[in-house]
Image (cartoon, grey):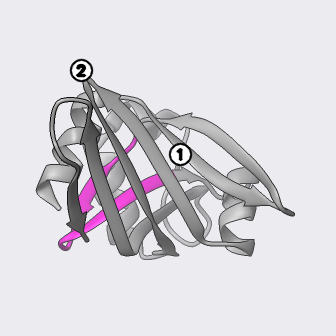
Amino acid sequence: MNRVYDFLKKAGTYYLATDENGQPRVRPFGTVHVFEDKLYIQTGKTKDVAKQIAANPNVEICAMLGDEWIRLCGTLVLDDRKEAQESMLDAYPHLRNMYTTGPDGNTAVYYFKDGTATISSFSHEPEVIRL
C-alpha cells in the first residue's frame, strides 16, 4: 500500500472515475492519505461525486508520474468517524477553511476496500499491488 500512496502523493493530481446512471464521470483530485493502514481519499459530503459514490462505490483512479502510470480500482467505503476526517484534514491543513468534521461537518472520507493498483510503463512489466 505504501507504494500506491507514495505514487499518488508524488503525482500530486490523480483522476477519479465514478458512475452516474451509466455515464462515466472523471475529475481531478489531490487528497490521498493513510489512516489505520487503509488508503483514504476525501471530498465534500454534498458534492455530486459523493452522491455518485453512495450510489455505486466502485471507482477507479488514474495518475501519471514520469514515465509510469497507476490505475487503482476498488470499492470505496465511507468512514464517517470524526477521527478519520480529522486525520485527513491534519494531512491537508489548507482544506480546513473549506471543510469541517464531525456529524454536522461537510467532510466525507473514504477508504479503499478490495483495491487493486497496477503501475505500468512502456519500459517495464506492470506491477500489481493489492490493498
Most foreground residue, 104 or 24: 24
Q: In the rendered view, does 77 fall on the left or right side of 68?
A: right
Secondary structure beneath dot 2 equals: loop
Q: Residues within 10 Å of mark 1 (few under 14, many from 20)?
A: some
Q: Residues within 10 Å of mark 2 (few under 14, many from 20)?
A: few
- The residue to which callout 1 is attached is 99
Residue 36 in magenta stretch: yes
Label 1 amino acid?
A: Tyr
| 2 over 119 or under it: above or below | below
| 9 over 79 or under it: above or below | above
Q: Which residues are magenta?
A: 31-42
Secondary structure beneath dot 1 equals: loop
Q: If the image is split into quadrants, where does the N terminus sit?
A: bottom left
Q: Earlier in the sequence, mark 2 or mark 1?
A: 2
The residue lying at 39 percent from left, 69 percent from top is 112
The residue lying at 24 percent from left, 23 percent from top is 67
Between the C-alphas of marks 2 and 1, the distance is 32 Å
Image spot of residue 24 (x, y percent): 74, 50
Most foreground residue, 107 or 51: 51
Q: In the rendered view, does 11 fall on the left or right side of 41?
A: left
Q: Residue furthest top?
A: 66
Image spot of residue 5 (x, y percent): 22, 50
Image spot of residue 104 (x, y percent): 62, 66
Q: In the rendered view, does 48 fall on the left or right side of 36?
A: right
Most foreground residue, 40 or 18: 18
- The residue to which callout 2 is attached is 66
The residue lying at 62 percent from left, 37 percent from top is 27
Q: If the image is split into quadrants, where does the C terminus sit?
A: bottom left
Image spot of residue 58 (x, y percent): 58, 70
Task: Determine the main secondary structure of the stretch shown in magenta.
Answer: strand
Give the foreground label among 2 and 1.
Answer: 2
| 47 over 52 or under it: above or below | above
